[in-house]
Image (tube, grey):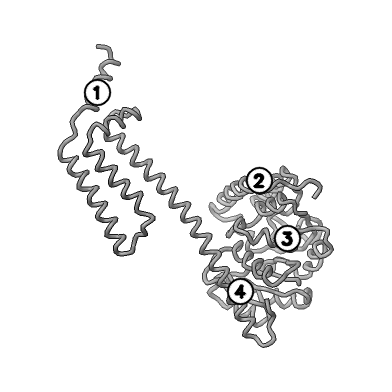
């Protein structure tokens, strides 16, 4: 057996190693907890409805990966990873990166809105001042 | 109607002298002081000197303070606006000379330059390097200005309308907004002014600020040059 074949054999072992039951149960519990947390936050009006689909999607994804084991194996092969866990990390980090960028965009938009509001407030207060002054300039 | 906008943050000490001199040097201007969330008596001293005071509820930045002044002037029917700093680095006696080309319809935007032979302004090493760099950058886009970071400017209503839009930055509106005006086909020029060492220039001196400044400026110059309309031919 050449070293290349040995490596390929090793990789197959990693890929086909059965997932432990504990991990699967943990993942399912985690996804259920996530759904519960999202629903609870929406009910408390701490989380707006339009921000929930992405987290529901994540919970659904985690549940699907743990309920349908071949899915993770297929994903792992698709990205050329050796172990399912590294494929999971890869997609996890990709997701976090995307969501951070998404929030940075939202934040930029909100910053602009807050600035425009504060400016509007300053201008309106100035107009109010000028109306209160008997001989003040009228904008 | 002519307006003079002065953005001010914590300037209770230096602002009164500027306003006092303006009352003599530019009596035909309506003076608007934009207090950018100062915790001192900036607004009170400005009001006492007879200026219209617009107060930000919190600190928004030098650019945002300028823009509040633009928005006010636009609503008040301004035809001409001069902006200057509150710290006394700009000379009120130069206001009339700076505004003249705009009032005469020769230019849309006039930048007051300290490097055209009037006064004896001296720049330190790094700051000077920055100035030369931005000069070269602007001239690459066909805009020749000797003092592109000068905050002493005069403009007409067309420029105000552009600057009141969301493209105007909250922190340092310098070469990027000049370039934007240039690319919108506005006539940008300069006139000589006297200047003293100011405080705003200090952003180009300390710590990582100058590195961030250059980075941010390059990014906004790129954004300004890759969006916006092309310069009108013959404009």
**Residue in front for this viewpoint, B188 or A123:** A123
Crowd rating for badge 1 (residues with CA inside 10 Å; few <14, some 14–19, many 20+): few
Q: Earlier in the sequence, mark 3 or mark 4?
A: 4
Crowd rating for badge 4 (residues with CA inside 10 Å; few <14, some 14–19, many 20+): many
Q: Which residue is depicted at the point 72% across and 78% down? A: B20
Closer mark to the observer between disc 3 and disc 1: 3
Closer mark to the observer between disc 3 and disc 4: 3
Q: Earlier in the sequence, mark 3 or mark 2?
A: 3
Q: Are marks 3 and 4 on the same chain?
A: yes
- Is residue B161 visible in the rendered image? The answer is yes
Q: Position of residue A38 (x, y in %)?
A: 29, 55
In whole angstroms, how far apart are the C-alphas of marks 1 and 4? 70 Å
Q: Dot 4: what SS? A: strand
Asked if the residue at tag 4 contacts the one at tag 3, i.e. Cβ–Cβ closer than 8 Å, the answer is: no
Q: Chain of mark 2?
A: B
- Is residue B86 visible in the rendered image? The answer is no
Question: Which residue has dot 1 on it?
Answer: A12
**Residue in front for this viewpoint, A48 or B155:** A48
Q: Dot 1: what SS? A: helix
Q: Position of residue A40 (x, y in %)?
A: 27, 60
**The quadrant where residue B65 appears:** bottom right
Question: Which residue has dot 2 on it?
Answer: B225
Question: Which residue has dot 4 on it?
Answer: B54
Q: Are marks 3 and 1 on the same chain?
A: no
Q: Are marks 1 and 4 on the same chain?
A: no
Q: Are marks 3 and 2 on the same chain?
A: yes
Q: Dot 2: what SS? A: helix
In the displayed structure image, the side of residue A29 where residue A103 appears, left or right: right
In whole angstroms, how far apart are the C-alphas of marks 2 and 4? 32 Å
Crowd rating for badge 2 (residues with CA inside 10 Å; few <14, some 14–19, many 20+): some
Q: Chain of mark 1?
A: A
């Amino acid at each position: 057996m050449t070293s290349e074949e040995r490596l390929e054999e090793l990789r197959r072992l990693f890929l086909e190693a059965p997932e432990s039951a504990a991990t699967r149960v943990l993942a399912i519990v985690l996804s259920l907890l996530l759904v519960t947390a999202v629903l609870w936050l929406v009910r408390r009006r701490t989380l707006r409805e339009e921000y929930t689909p992405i987290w529901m999607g994540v919970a659904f994804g985690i549940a699907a990966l743990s309920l349908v084991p071949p899915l993770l194996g297929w994903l792992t092969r698709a990205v050329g990873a050796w172990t399912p866990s590294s494929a999971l990390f890869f997609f996890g980090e990709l997701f976090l990166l995307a969501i951070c960028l998404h929030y940075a965009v939202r934040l930029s938009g909100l910053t602009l809105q807050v600035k425009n509001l504060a400016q509007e407030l300053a201008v309106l207060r100035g107009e109010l001042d000028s109306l209160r002054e008997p001989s003040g300039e009228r904008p | 109607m002519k307006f003079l906008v002065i953005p001010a943050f914590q300037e209770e000490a230096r602002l009164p002298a500027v306003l006092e001199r303006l009352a003599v040097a530019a009596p035909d201007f309506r003076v608007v002081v934009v207090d950018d969330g100062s915790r001192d008596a900036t607004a009170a001293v400005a009001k006492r000197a007879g200026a219209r005071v617009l107060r930000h509820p919190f600190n928004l930045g030098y650019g945002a303070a300028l823009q509040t002044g633009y928005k006010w002037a636009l609503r008040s029917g301004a035809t001409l606006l001069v902006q200057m700093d509150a710290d006394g680095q700009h000379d009120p006696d130069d206001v009339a000379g700076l505004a003249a080309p705009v009032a005469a319809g020769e230019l849309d935007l006039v930048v007051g330059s300290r490097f055209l032979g009037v006064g004896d302004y001296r720049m330190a090493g790094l700051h000077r390097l920055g100035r030369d760099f931005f000069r070269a950058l602007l001239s690459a886009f066909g805009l020749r200005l000797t003092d592109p970071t000068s905050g002493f400017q005069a403009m007409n209503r067309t420029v105000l309308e552009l600057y009141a839009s969301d493209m105007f930055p909250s922190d340092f509106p310098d070469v990027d907004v000049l370039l934007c005006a240039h690319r919108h086909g506005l006539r940008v020029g300069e006139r000589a002014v006297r200047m003293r060492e100011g405080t705003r220039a200090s952003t180009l001196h300390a710590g990582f600020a100058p590195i961030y400044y250059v980075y941010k400026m390059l990014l906004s110059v790129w954004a300004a040059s890759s969006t916006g309309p092309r310069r009108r031919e013959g404009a």
